[in-house]
Amino acid sequence: MTVATLASPKSKGRKRADRLRDRRYATETREQLAQRFPRCFMPKGAPKLPLKIGIYHDLKLAAPDISSRRLHLALRDYTGGPTYLAALREGAHRLGLDGWPDGIVSADQAADARRRLSSKKRRIAKEHADDQDRAA
């Protein structure tokens, strides 16, 4: 038997509830970061600039009241969006918590961001096409 066969409908609902909770945590924490570090973190939908490598550790020191889990979720949400990925261009300055440049985006990092953005766009287009097929 596979693990999928053992999963009950209740566990699927639990996973959905966990995803919704994590989404809420990410959104709430992103708002906190934008308020506390406005020169580094932009609000949802605003143009973004690349963050310095290792900013998670800086955040742990500067905001010890925010849990590791919430920081992880917020950073994953912030850095995984199309606006952020589009900002990762070779030679672009990365920002520290104070808003000052702290590092530069390398060619490999820019190429990886382009690949991830392209993949994200393809997935969104496929989901949109699937939604239209279901509606028809």
Image (tube, rainbow, N blue to C red):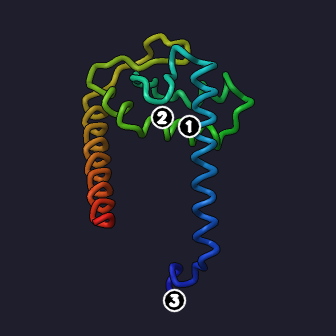
Q: Name the disc covering residue 78, or none.
A: 2
Q: Position of residue 44 (x, y in %)?
A: 48, 30
Q: Name the disc covering residue 63, or none.
A: none
- Mark 2 crowd level (few <14, some 14–19, many ≥20, 10 Å Cα): many
Q: Position of residue 1 (x, y in %)?
A: 51, 89
Observer-side mark, 3 or 1, equals 1
* Quarter of the rendering occupied by the C terminus: bottom left
As drawn, 72 above or below 132? above
Label 3, label 2: how far apart the Cα atoms are: 38 Å
Q: Name the disc covering residue 1, or none.
A: 3
Residue receiving disc 1 = 74
Going from N to C along the chain, the mark reached first, 3 or 2, is 3
Residue at (33%, 26%) from the top-left corner?
A: 87
Going from N to C along the chain, the mark reached first, 3 or 1, is 3
Residue at (61%, 20%) from the top-left corner?
A: 35
Q: Tag 3, which secondary structure?
A: loop
Q: Are marks 1 and 2 in contact (CB under 8 Å)?
A: yes
As drawn, 73 above or below 40? below
